[in-house]
Image: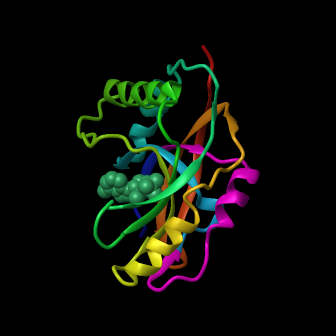
Amino acid sequence: MSTRRFFVAIALPAPVRDALVALAEPLPGTSWTRPETLHLTLRFIGGVPEEKIADITHHLATVRVEPFILPIEGVGAFPPKGPPRVLWSGVGQGHPRLHQLRQQVDDALLASGLTDLDVRTFHPHVTLARCTPTGAPTFTRWMHLHQQFAAPPFRVNAFELYASELRPGGVVHTPVQRFVLRK
Ligand code: 3AM
C-alpha cells in the first residue's frame, strides 16, 4: 500500500510549464520531471495521518498574502558544487511576497501542530530533473546554455496542498486543496 506524503506548493500555469519543458534534453543519468508534476514547493510536510489534514487545511486557509507576480528564471544545480543531484530553475533575488507566503505557510503548519519542519534555508526553485552523479561536463554545458532562461512571468493567485504518492509508474501528485491568495 502506498503512503501519502504531503507538501505545499505553487502550481505553474501551462505557458510556464511549456517553457520549462523546453529545457529538457537527453542527458546521461538524468530523469526529467513530468510536465504535469512541475511545481514550486513552499514546504514539504512529509507523511502525516489523513485525519490530521482537516486541521492543516483549516490553518492554511488563514494565510493572508496578496497575489504577486513571479518570474521563474535562470537554472542551477543542487548541490551547487560537485556532481548534481537536482537540476532546477529558480526565481532570482527579491520577491518578498513569495518569502512572506512561505513564512505564513510555516506559521500555519506550526499552528496546526506540526513540529518537525526542516530548518534549512528556503531556496525557491522548480525541480526540472534528478540526476545520478555522472556526466558533470554535460551538466556544465547545459547550465551555461540556459543561464539566461526566463519563463513568462505569471501571477501567483493561489497555493495548493498536494498529496504525493510513489506508484509503480512514478510519483503522482494529487491536489488536495487550493487556497486563494488575498490580503
Ligand atoms: O520541489 P522539489 O522537487 O525540490 O524533493 C521533493 C520535492 O521537492 C521534496 O518535496 C517536494 C515535493 O515532493 N521532498 C521529498 N521528500 C523530502 C524530504 N524527506 C522532501 N523535502 C525534504 N525532505
Q: Is 12 inside the magenta-drawn segment?
A: yes
> Which of 92/60 is in front?
92
Residue 65 shows up from this direction: yes
Q: Residue at x 48, y 28 (%)?
A: 101
Q: Residue at x 53, y 18 (%)?
A: 64
Left or right of 39 in this view: 45 = left
> Which of 49/19 is in front?
19
Q: Residue at x 44, y 84 (%)?
A: 29
Q: Position of residue 67 (x, y in %)?
A: 64, 24
Colouring convention used in this rendered image of the protein: rainbow
Q: Position of residue 99 (x, y in %)?
A: 44, 29
Does residue 67 lie above or below 178 as drawn?
above
| Ligand 1 rendered quadrant | bottom left
Where is the N terminus found, in terms of image quarters? bottom left
> Which of 169/11 is in front?
11
> Which of 129/136 is in front?
136
- In the rendered image, the residue lying farthest to the right is 15
- Please give the range of residues in magenta: 8-31
Does residue 35 lie above or below 132 as drawn?
above
Q: Position of residue 169 (x, y in %)?
A: 55, 78
Q: Position of residue 57 (x, y in %)?
A: 49, 32
